[in-house]
Image (cartoon, rainbow, N blue to C red):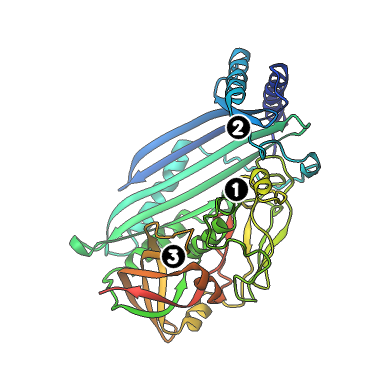
């Protein structure tokens, strides 16, 4: 449900910016205007903790004088402010260095078709109703098991935004989108033996959220399951990344094949186009036109048309992730990924989570990762982890205070299977991932 009147209001402002840039002598320009509204509430221990209403707007303009570029932003849409903002961008551009790769995308790559992707579902909810949901969710979690001893609370967030983007090539488009979430985090145990875990649900349409009861129960189940965790002795063994952890693994791959990393030569996957980087059963593709999905878009943040495409097929890297600028630096063409990927999907295998545990047989299930120990230049990977020790496909006991380590290049090549337990709560859609083996440092 799009409010065309609101989109048109923003389009008028963006057009004013583009006209002003031309009047001030810019050879090319692009501008964006976004307006966001939302409500966030949280409750803890049965009481209201926070109620926040958000109403933000932001305007950004980038101008080009040949190959010189300048940008400026404001949140004031008065005509004087718009003129001053363009003037500031032009002033920066005039003093900027020439950059042979700067500029707008090629006009023939801009999007011309704009299907309804079903991204906008405003949630007609007031603060009182949102508080009721949050406290119900937390109460379910706190009452789930007598081991639950404290809470970090539950929160409900609802957000709606309107975004318009335009450039001096004649592109001027906008859309509205919504995003709603419910989350809960509780603690179990006492003293030094306390454990914490959480669960959350997110959707464009509030009707697609898990219920307060479901979120509360999952948060409690996950927390109680971690009680009496042990460390492991140092060893090498198979490792299964739960689906919510697997997205980070794929995110590291995407970072390594993104234009910025490649033209700076700071990637462990330099010069790997058309070579095998994953087992031959792995397919990774973009699906930008999925209705109602969190990463859907018919154009990227430069107005370039998105398209459904394979990034990896048969384990072979078929394409990088490029914006106009990074593509030009590499002597290639943009892939419509300015601003990121769109519903990046790792094709699921045939096993559900129970089936993946059976395949793991005896090894480590990772459900939480800590630290930033990923070196994008070398691929070296070392992160604190917790999860569960599994024997004969059955969870035996929770595990904590260990480090898992490997090198992403060989980790990716040694993927054994991908589950069909796909986590749809983000822009990377992937099931659990089983790796042949990793080093584990423990006691």
**Relative to the observer, which residue lies in front, 233 or 376?**
376
Q: Quadrant of residue 302?
A: top right
Q: Quadrant of the N terminus?
A: top right
**Relative to the observer, which residue lies in front, 424 or 211?**
424
Rate crowding at label 3 as few (under 14), some (14 to 19) or many (20 or more) other CA atoms within 10 Å.
some
Query: Residue at (49%, 83%) from the top-left corner?
Result: 358
Query: Residue at (54%, 71%) from the top-left corner?
Result: 412
Rate crowding at label 2 as few (under 14), some (14 to 19) or many (20 or more) other CA atoms within 10 Å.
many
Q: Residue 40: x, y in percent?
A: 45, 39
SS under mark 3:
strand
Q: Which residue is mark 1?
A: 204
SS under mark 1:
loop
CA–CA distance between discs 1 and 3?
Answer: 36 Å
Q: Is residue 257 placed above or below 96 in the rendered structure?
A: below
Q: Is residue 136 placed above or below 411 in the rendered structure?
A: above
In this view of the protein, can residue 60 be seen by the observer? no
Q: Earlier in the sequence, mark 2 or mark 1?
A: 2
Q: Earlier in the sequence, mark 2 or mark 3?
A: 2
Q: Residue 308: x, y in percent?
A: 73, 57
Q: Earlier in the sequence, mark 1 or mark 3?
A: 1
Q: Is residue 434 placed above or below 260 in the rendered structure?
A: below
Q: Which residue is mark 3?
A: 380
Q: Residue 185: x, y in percent?
A: 36, 54
């Amino acid at each position: 449900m799009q409010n065309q009147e609101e989109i048109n209001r923003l389009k008028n402002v963006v057009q004013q910016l583009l006209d002003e840039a031309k009047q001030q002598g810019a050879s090319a320009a692009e501008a964006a205007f976004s307006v966001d509204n939302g409500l966030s509430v949280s409750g803890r221990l049965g009481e209201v903790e926070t109620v926040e209403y958000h109403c933000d707007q932001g305007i950004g303009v980038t101008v080009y004088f040949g190959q010189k570029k300048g940008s400026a932003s404001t949140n004031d849409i008065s005509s004087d402010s718009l003129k001053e903002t363009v003037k500031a961008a032009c002033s920066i551009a005039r003093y900027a260095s020439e950059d042979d790769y700067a500029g707008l995308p090629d006009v023939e790559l801009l999007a011309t078709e704009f299907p309804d992707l079903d991204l906008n579902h405003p949630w007609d909810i007031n603060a009182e109703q949102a508080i009721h949901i949050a406290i119900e969710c937390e109460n379910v979690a706190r009452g789930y098991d007598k081991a639950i001893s404290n809470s970090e609370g539950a929160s409900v967030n609802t957000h709606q935004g309107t975004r318009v983007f335009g450039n001096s090539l004649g592109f001027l488009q906008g859309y509205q989108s919504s995003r709603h979430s419910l989350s809960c985090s509780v603690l179990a145990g006492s003293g030094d033996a306390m454990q914490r875990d959480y669960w959350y649900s997110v959707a464009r349409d509030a009707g697609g959220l898990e219920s307060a009861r479901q979120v509360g129960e999952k948060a409690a189940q996950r927390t109680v399951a971690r009680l009496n965790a042990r460390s492991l002795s140092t060893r090498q063994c198979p490792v299964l990344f739960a689906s919510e952890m697997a997205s980070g693994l794929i995110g590291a791959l995407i970072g390594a094949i993104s234009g910025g990393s490649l033209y700076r030569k700071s990637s462990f996957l330099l010069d790997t186009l058309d070579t095998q980087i994953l087992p031959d059963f792995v397919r990774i593709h973009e699906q930008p036109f999925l209705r109602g999905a969190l990463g859907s878009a018919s154009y990227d943040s430069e107005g370039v048309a998105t398209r459904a495409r394979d990034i990896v097929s048969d384990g072979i890297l078929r394409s990088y992730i490029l914006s106009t600028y990074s593509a030009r630096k590499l002597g290639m063409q943009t892939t419509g990924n300015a601003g990121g990927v769109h519903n990046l999907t790792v094709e699921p295998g045939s096993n559900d989570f129970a089936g993946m545990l059976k395949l793991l047989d005896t090894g480590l299930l990772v459900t939480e990762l800590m630290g930033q120990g990923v070196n994008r230049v070398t691929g070296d990977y070392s992160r604190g982890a917790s999860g569960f020790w599994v024997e004969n496909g059955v969870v035996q006991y929770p595990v904590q205070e260990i480090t898992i380590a490997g090198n992403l290049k060989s980790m990716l090549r040694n993927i054994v299977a991908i589950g069909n337990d796909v986590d749809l709560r983000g822009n990377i859609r992937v099931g659990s991932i089983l790796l042949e083996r990793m080093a584990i440092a423990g006691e």
